[in-house]
Image (spheres, coloured by chain):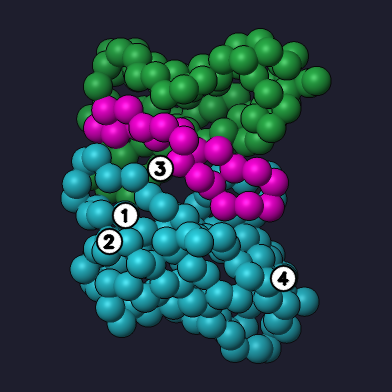
């Protein structure tokens, strides 16, 4: 069983729509959850983190965490072509980050 | 300017060469990491250093040799690599590996090609 699972995509959404990215994790004791964005050939950059159950909003981004279901998601409202990238989910439990394979998002103008 | 700097950005080396990758962080972090990212594969953790001590080695072949002289600098020494070692090598740093709520910041990576 993979530790962090993401649908590899590509996920295609029209410009202005809501993009929904999902991630599940296997270690129930995981404490911290992160979303990174990685453009092709570039290093990952942190866009959001969440530690508690529920929603956390930051601009157009909303992270949602459900520890009982071992599920974390990222919503991107009003998607823009510049949001086209690979989104990496990462999970931490007192150890280095464990990354999922990433979901490739394509926002179509 | 990034808080985590990697050099060189690109490296082409032969299988018999010896080279080193360098990483420096200016964030006051105590933990530093080496990750490998091959095409169409997720990030793979290679090594972790916490307060200059190696705390994880994820079954990395001995042709990769890390060195952490202090909390701000991390090296990856390379020798007798194979073509399949060609990848993007990423350095990252974070506040503390024991802390639950510390995100990692990445350098820009070194694109390594082994010929």
| Cα separation between marks 1 and 4 | 27 Å
Observer able to see residue B34: no
Query: What's the mark number on residue B45?
Result: none
Q: Are marks 1 and 4 on the same chain?
A: yes
Residue that badge 4 annotates: B113
In the structure shown, which secondary structural element does the residue marked by tag 3 occupy?
A: strand
Name the tint of chain A in the rendering. Answer: green
Which residue is most to the right?
A: A109
**Pointers 1 and 3 in contact (C-beta within 8 Å):** no
Q: Are marks 2 and 3 on the same chain?
A: no
Instruction: Give the side of residue A86 with respect to residue B57, left or right.
Output: right
Provide residue A105's location: percent of width, then percent of height: 67, 27
| Cα separation between marks 3 and 4 | 25 Å
Q: Are marks 1 and 3 on the same chain?
A: no
| Cα separation between marks 1 and 3 | 14 Å
| Cα separation between marks 4 and 2 | 29 Å
Q: Which dot, 2 or 3, sits closer to the camera? A: 2
Q: Earlier in the sequence, mark 1 or mark 2?
A: 2
Residue that badge 3 annotates: A98
State the quadrant of the N terminus of chain A.
top left
Residue that badge 2 annotates: B29
Frontmost residue, A22 versus B105: B105
Observer able to see residue A98: yes
Provide residue A11's location: percent of width, then percent of height: 69, 21
Q: Residue at x 61, y 30 (%)?
A: A103
Q: Earlier in the sequence, mark 4 or mark 2?
A: 2
Tell me: residue B74, above or below residue A49: below
Q: Earlier in the sequence, mark 1 or mark 4?
A: 1
Q: Which chain is cyan?
A: B
In the structure shown, which secondary structural element does the residue marked by tag 2 occupy?
A: loop
């Amino acid at each position: 069983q993979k530790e962090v699972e993401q649908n590899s995509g590509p996920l295609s959404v029209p410009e202005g729509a809501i993009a929904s990215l999902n991630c599940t994790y296997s270690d129930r004791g995981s404490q911290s959850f992160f979303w990174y964005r990685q453009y092709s050939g570039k290093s990952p950059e942190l866009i959001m983190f969440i530690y508690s159950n529920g929603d956390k909003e930051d601009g157009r981004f909303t992270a949602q965490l459900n520890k009982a279901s071992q599920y974390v998601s990222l919503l991107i409202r009003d998607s823009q072509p510049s949001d086209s990238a690979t989104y990496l989910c990462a999970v931490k439990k007192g150890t280095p980050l464990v990354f999922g394979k990433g979901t490739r998002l394509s926002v179509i103008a | 300017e990034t808080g985590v700097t990697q050099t060189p950005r690109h490296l082409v080396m032969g299988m018999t060469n010896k080279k080193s990758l360098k990483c420096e962080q200016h964030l006051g972090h105590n933990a530093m990491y080496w990750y490998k990212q091959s095409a169409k594969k997720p990030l793979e953790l290679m090594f972790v250093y916490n307060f200059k001590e190696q705390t994880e080695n994820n079954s990395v072949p001995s042709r990769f040799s890390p060195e952490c002289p202090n909390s701000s600098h991390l090296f990856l020494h390379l020798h007798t690599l194979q073509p399949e070692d060609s990848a993007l090598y990423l350095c990252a740093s974070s506040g503390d590996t024991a802390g639950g709520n510390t995100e990692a910041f990445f350098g820009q990576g070194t694109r390594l090609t082994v010929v």
